[in-house]
Amino acid sequence: MIKRILAIIVGAGIAGGAGFLWYAWYPALPKVAPPQPGQFSAAKIERGRIVAAESYCVECHTRQDIGGGPRLAGDYKMVSPFGAIYSSNITPDPETGIGNWSEEALRRALRYGISRDGSHLLPAFVYDHFTKMTDADISDLYAWIMSQPAVHMTRRPNGFPLSISPRFTLAGWKLLYFRPGVYQPDPKHDAMWNRGAYLAEGAAHCGACHTPRGLLGAEKVPDEMYDGGAVDGWIAPPLNDKNPTPVVWTEDELYDYLRNGVAPLHGPAGGPMSPVAHDFLATVPEEDVHAIAHYFADVDHAAQRVGGDKAALRTAMEQSKRDLAGSVLSTDPDARLYQGACAACHYNAAPMPVLGRPELALNNALWLDEPTNLYLVMLRGLTAEEGQSGVAMPSFYNALSDHDMARIAAYLRRTRTTLPPWTDLDKKAAEARKLVEEPPVNSSH
Ligand code: HEC
Ligand code: HEC
Ligand code: HEC
């Protein structure tokens, strides 16, 4: 595959720069007068609100560091291996936002990653997914955006080398990795599956976090689609049958997780997954969330695997009880440490975990190749907005040393999984601590 692409580039080189210039150059689109209030029907604006929610436009276009910022006014900081990237103002302000963009200009940006002035946009703006959105959805989205309050605000200059060198070089990246085009329904599947796939692969861009990326930041598709990725220091677990958690992600589990932010047999949506569930998928039509769950239950082959996970569930619940019985405590100092710090909340005596008190043996944090998510949860805790609304976990940033966390991680891994022990646990605990910039306010002592 890679060889073939190189051949194309070499070929393009031989044909001369002219062909590439033709490929890379886009005209500026004319400025238009900002749409008048009342130009769009309420029904159209509401449909656009749903499209925007299913694509998390607000998440990436609202500043969250240095005290936050106005909605959709941009300057949201994204950390990439190449440097910090700040998003644009997409409110209808004509000078600093996209107030004088036509619908055509928005469509071209989402489908081809080209700004109104003709320059190439960074793929941090996930247009490799948005390209799949239909014209009708983009039209509704345009109506919603243009009906939001205009905010006059500019973003910080980004720390990305490409901002110094011409944006033109992005065309080369696109030539290598970007395949524009609206989602094409797969006739082998029913309408619900196709709706789920359309949303997951397009607007909701699940793969942007859950698919691993190569050296130049492109998702490794289709070969490693949904094999698991990394975001903001967290591991986004695999969503296919490589997902390591002992209980299968069925359609029901997926629905609960995506809609309510917590799955009974897995646990809460924490970290960067929390807004996906709470701020966005909780606010869209139920059928759309069902469709996404339906699609992923097929991606992970839940139907073929369900039932085979009963024993794992039983083992997990028995371990929880055995721990509390006290027999291990006298001999194992790690068990004592875990007992004191965690078991009061993570103990389950019933045959099923209690909602809001996740059974750690079933959570991805213990089963991933690295202890990263487990460490981040201990260091940050979980706010009442994450996972199941209203319940919180305190931060152990001050209460546990790196070595304490390493002992708890090793203990949970050896008593609750069938996987090989993690290595370099102390070192990785120190690294995770650096990711949590300062002790969260709700730190326990
Ligand atoms: C994962 C984060 C992310 C999401 C989600 C996202 N954007 Fe962006 N967007 C960005 C970044 C970063 C840029 C700046 C790209 C650049 O500077 O090249 C951007 C740029 C844009 C631009 C170009 C603005 C200009 O002046 O050139 C538009 C238009 C835009 N986004 C619209 C949207 C819409 C509409 C949505 C929801 C459908 C959305 N974005 C969702 C990150 C995101
Ligand atoms: C901004 C990045 C991001 C996006 C976008 C995203 N996820 Fe996630 N997802 C994560 C992270 C990080 C976790 C781990 C959270 C945790 O363990 O609390 C996660 C966890 C999950 C889990 C739980 C996996 C497990 O084994 O515990 C599921 C299921 C999931 N995501 C599905 C989805 C779906 C479906 C979409 C698209 C609708 C999606 N995610 C979009 C980052 C993301
Ligand atoms: C005061 C109660 C409490 C204590 C003590 C506690 N937790 Fe939690 N923990 C919770 C709650 C509540 C949740 C789920 C939150 C939700 O559903 O929103 C949770 C969730 C988790 C998760 C799942 C996170 C995710 O995003 O999937 C992990 C892992 C975890 N805790 C580990 C620990 C460890 C390790 C300790 C001991 C160092 C500990 N917890 C101590 C209450 C607690």
Image (spheres, rainbow, N blue to C red):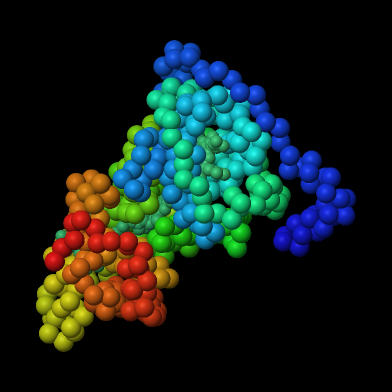
Horizontal relation, residue 400 to residue 169: left or right: left
Q: Quadrant of residue 340?
A: bottom left
- Number of numbered tags placed on the structure image: 0
Residue 333 x, y percent position in the rendering: 18, 83
- At horizontal 43% and vertical 45% (from top left) the residue drawn is 76
Quadrant that contains the N terminus: bottom right
Tell which residue pokes out farthest to the bottom in this image: 331
- At horizontal 57% and vertical 26% (from top left) the residue drawn is 101
Residue 409 x, y percent position in the rendering: 29, 74
Q: Is residue 184 above or below residue 66?
A: above
Q: Quadrant of residue 287?
A: top left
Horizontal relation, residue 41 to residue 263: left or right: right
- At horizontal 78% and vertical 44% (from top left) the residue drawn is 21
Tell which residue pokes out farthest to the top in this image: 38
Horizontal relation, residue 320 to residue 234: left or right: left
Q: Quadrant of residue 126?
A: top right
Q: Is residue 281 above or below residue 105?
A: below
Residue 316 x, y percent position in the rendering: 27, 68
Is residue 234 visible from the viewing direction of this image? yes
